[in-house]
Image (cartoon, helix red, strand yellow):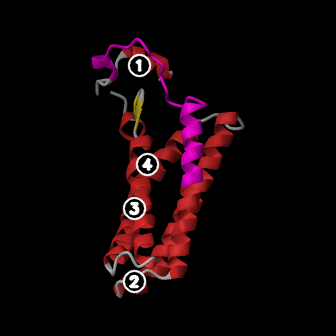
Amino acid sequence: MKLSYFWRGLPGHPIHPPLTGATIGAFTFATVAGLAEVTGITENSGAYGWWIALVFGLIVTVPTALTGLLDWLSIERGTELWKTATSHMIAMLSATVFFALAAIFGHAAYKHGDTSSGAYTLTVIGFLLETLGGWLGGAVVYVHGMRVLNLVREPAGRAVSPIPHAEKERAEGS
């Protein structure tokens, strides 16, 4: 077992993509909860859900961003994959800044069970940037094939195994 498996994941099972699910889910929920509050669908509960989801999203952003950075550092500079991955990273970091600003500037309103229009606007901008970043991240995997092994005939049991097999390590170039 290689030490790098702890921060990069196993061949064919990288750690960064699953973490993005938690991050994107939290920020998406924050956007929806904030919308429910600013449109009057909820009375206070949307604001509480919005702010708590923002804070949770910011917390899970840390391991998500760190594992993404470690993957990015492994890419050959100047390649088309690197350009796409760099654009993905910039979009996601920009989104994180907007979500952090929303949490900071929206905290006072949150304490009173409200979502301010300015803080919600920052949330929407963060969500749009996150959506762009997700699109670019999808291109990294599904167009450029980063960390994809393409072992189409791999038996199901070996494909999902948490134990790295020699075929997977060779396919990834480990």
Q: Is residue 97 visible?
A: no
The part of the chain drawn in magenta is: 131-159
Check disc 2: other Cα within 10 Å, few if <14, some if 14-19, many if 20+. many
C-alpha gap between disc 1 and disc 2 = 51 Å
Can you give x and y, in whole percent of width and height, for residue 92 in the image? 55, 55
* Residue 154 lies in quadrant: top left
Badge 2 marks a residue whose secondary structure is loop
| Pointer 3 or 4: first along the chain | 4
Which numbered marker is on residue 114?
A: 2
Q: Is residue 140 magenta?
A: yes
Residues 53 and 87: in front is: 53
| Pointer 1 or 2: first along the chain | 2
Can you give x and y, in whole percent of width and height, for residue 146 in the image? 54, 31
Badge 3 marks a residue whose secondary structure is helix
C-alpha gap between disc 3 and disc 2 = 16 Å
The residue type indicated by label 3 comes to: Phe
Circles 1 and 4: CB distance less than 8 Å? no
What residue would you read off at disc 1?
168
* Residue 47 lies in quadrant: bottom left
Circles 3 and 2: CB distance less than 8 Å? no
Q: Note whether 47 is above or below 81 in the view shown.
A: below
Q: What residue sits 42% from the left and 86% below the top?
A: 108
Which numbered marker is on residue 29?
A: 3
The residue type indicated by label 2 comes to: Asp
Circles 3 and 1: CB distance less than 8 Å? no
| Pointer 3 or 2: first along the chain | 3
Q: Is residue 49 magenta?
A: no
Q: What residue sits 44% from the left and 59% below the top?
A: 28
Can you give x and y, in whole percent of width and height, for residue 166 in the image? 38, 15
| Pointer 3 or 1: first along the chain | 3
What residue would you read off at disc 4?
20
